[in-house]
Amino acid sequence: MTETQPKPSIDVRTVPPRERHPRIFGMLGALPAGGSMLITSDHDPRPLRYQLETNFPGEFGWDYLEKGPEAWRVEIARLEEGAGCECCCGSDH
């Protein structure tokens, strides 16, 4: 029987604003293909999503787990090689 490792997560509500994206991108860079991480924020992290889609088109998937108003929770997955669509949205449609 194998144990599943917990997903890396970050609650950016406890991180100074200027350090949030660098920390998140550091964690994303360490994800293996098929791996994912969880982010908790006090606002909709759309700017982060736009940054991912612009700088890493088709490399990451994005799934809202909770949409406010107190907290937003998002799961970001590093897509498998060749996964995702070709329209740069990060989706698998």
Image: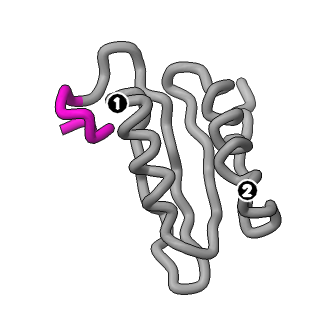
Q: Give the range drawn in magenta.
A: 85-93
Q: Position of residue 67 (x, y in %)?
A: 46, 74
In the image, which is nearer the foreground, mark 2 or mark 1?
2
Residue 17 vertical position relative to residue 79 in the rendered view, above or below: below
Residue 31 vertical position relative to residue 15 in the rendered view, above or below: above
Q: Nearer the viewer, residue 73 or 88?
A: 88
Q: Position of residue 55 (x, y in %)?
A: 43, 32
- At label 2, the amino acid type is Arg
Mark drawn on residue 57? 1
For label 1, the SS is: loop
Image quarter of residue 14: bottom right
Label pair 2/1, CB-CB below 8 angstroms? no
Q: How far apart are marks 2 and 1 (CA)?
A: 23 Å
* Residue at figure coordinates x 27%, y 41% from the top left: 89
Mark drawn on residue 18? 2
* Residue at figure coordinates x 32%, y 38% from the top left: 90
Image quarter of residue 85: top left
Figure disc tally: 2
Say whether disc 2 or disc 1 marks the residue closer to the N-terminus: 2
